[in-house]
């Protein structure tokens, strides 16, 4: 049970109106924050316990697949999950479904951001620990989102912390071309950089928002399929499959910019990359036209649902 995926699912069902699933996501994430506070893990078992270490099962499987259970993520710190939790709580509040326990969990998440924001983290893609831009801007988005509906004392504190996060990140991770870069020591592009503006870290018309979207679609997409980031000098499709989550992020970003026809092209292209039951993996091999990676992949289904709901309404 991934904290980030629970938050994405909660955001999606909040947009679509399935409030029972939203309540489930809020309860699970709140309980983990109360349990572990600033040491919130990226993932848990479905009962809230620690994920076991990764091990090999010794079983035959699909060619190119892995016979593994457990996950080394149990030893990682991912800063952005605190921001995602705040975004989930804000979505719940928008439907009148954030209770006192949820507000206390929000206090814990905001305090954890203040305490740990200068630490290197593994980021959304579980890579080497760095000051990932996406992680810090996602925390700013969560703080801004909940500050907008919080009591005055909380609102002022959280807004000031969000401003500090954006200012610090701007000073270290603005590319010379005016777009965001992955980290202070990594000038590359990354699909994850499209997400914070969608969540309110920055306005849609911020020059960095627009420049990042345009540079990303020019450099890391092919035929309306999107890739996470560049792996060295090899062609994109030889390094990994297209990431369907990233395709939906582009659809949402184009929608936010008012480009509805282009947003629908992105949505339909990636929506079609599913298996016969209508389930999505995390990756899609555009050459072989085959599914790749984990099946089913929770965050892909969540973003597909959210994108469908948001493209049906005017951009905000």
Image (spheres, grey):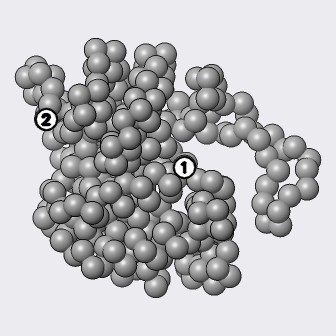
* Image position, residue 194 (x, y; %): 33, 61
- Indicate the secondary structure of the residue bearing disc 1: helix
Question: Relative to 170, is 179 above or below?
Answer: below
- When the figure is inspected, residue 224 is found, relative to residue 55, above or below; the finding is below
- The residue identified by callout 1 is 298
Left or right for 78, reference 98:
right
Label 2 sits on residue: 148
Q: Residues within 10 Å of mark 2 (few under 14, many from 20)?
A: some
Counting labels gives: 2
Identify the secondary structure beneath mark 2: loop
Q: Quadrant of residue 75?
A: top right
Q: In screen coordinates, is 65 left or right of 216?
A: right
Q: CA distance from mark 2 to mark 1?
A: 29 Å
Would residue 301 be visible to someone looking at this image?
Answer: yes
Residue at (53%, 30%) from the top-left corner? 41
Write the residue at 63% across / 84% down. 287
| Image spot of residue 240 (x, y percent) | 61, 70
Report whether residue 211 is seen. Answer: no
- Disc number lying in front (2 or 1): 1
Q: Quadrant of the C terminus?
A: bottom left
Specify few, some or many for label 1: CA neighbours under 10 Å numbering under 14, 14-19, or 20 or more: many
Judge by depth and name the residue closer to the eye, 62 or 208.
62
């Amino acid at each position: 049970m991934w904290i980030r995926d629970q938050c994405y699912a909660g955001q999606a069902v909040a947009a679509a109106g399935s409030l029972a699933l939203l309540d489930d996501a809020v309860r699970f994430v709140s309980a983990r924050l109360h349990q572990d506070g600033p040491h919130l893990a990226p993932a848990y078992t479905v009962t809230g316990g620690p994920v076991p270490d990764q091990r090999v099962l010794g079983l035959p499987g699909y060619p190119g697949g892995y016979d593994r259970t457990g996950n080394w993520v149990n030893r990682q710190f991912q800063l952005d999950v605190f921001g995602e939790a705040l975004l989930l709580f804000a979505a719940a509040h928008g439907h009148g479904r954030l209770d006192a326990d949820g507000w206390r969990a929000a206090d814990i998440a905001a305090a954890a951001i203040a305490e740990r924001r200068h630490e290197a983290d593994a980021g959304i893609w579980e890579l080497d620990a760095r000051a990932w831009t996406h992680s810090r801007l996602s925390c700013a988005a969560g703080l801004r989102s909940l500050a907008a509906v919080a009591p005055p004392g909380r609102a002022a504190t959280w807004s000031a912390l969000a401003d500090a996060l954006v200012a610090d990140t701007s000073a270290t991770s603005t590319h010379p071309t005016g777009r965001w870069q992955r980290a202070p020591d990594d000038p590359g592009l990354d699909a994850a950089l499209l997400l914070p503006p969608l969540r309110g870290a920055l306005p849609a018309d911020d020059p960095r928002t627009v420049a990042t979207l345009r540079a990303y679609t020019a450099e890391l997409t092919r035929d309306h399929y999107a890739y996470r980031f560049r792996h060295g000098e090899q062609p994109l499709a030889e390094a990994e499959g297209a990431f369907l989550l990233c395709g939906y992020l582009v659809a949402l970003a184009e929608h936010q910019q008012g480009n509805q026809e282009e947003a629908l092209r992105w949505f339909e292209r990636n929506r079609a990359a599913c298996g016969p039951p209508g389930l999505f993996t995390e990756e899609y091999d555009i050459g072989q036209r085959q599914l790749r990676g984990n099946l089913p992949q929770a965050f892909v289904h969540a973003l597909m649902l959210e994108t469908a709901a948001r493209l049906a309404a005017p951009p905000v």
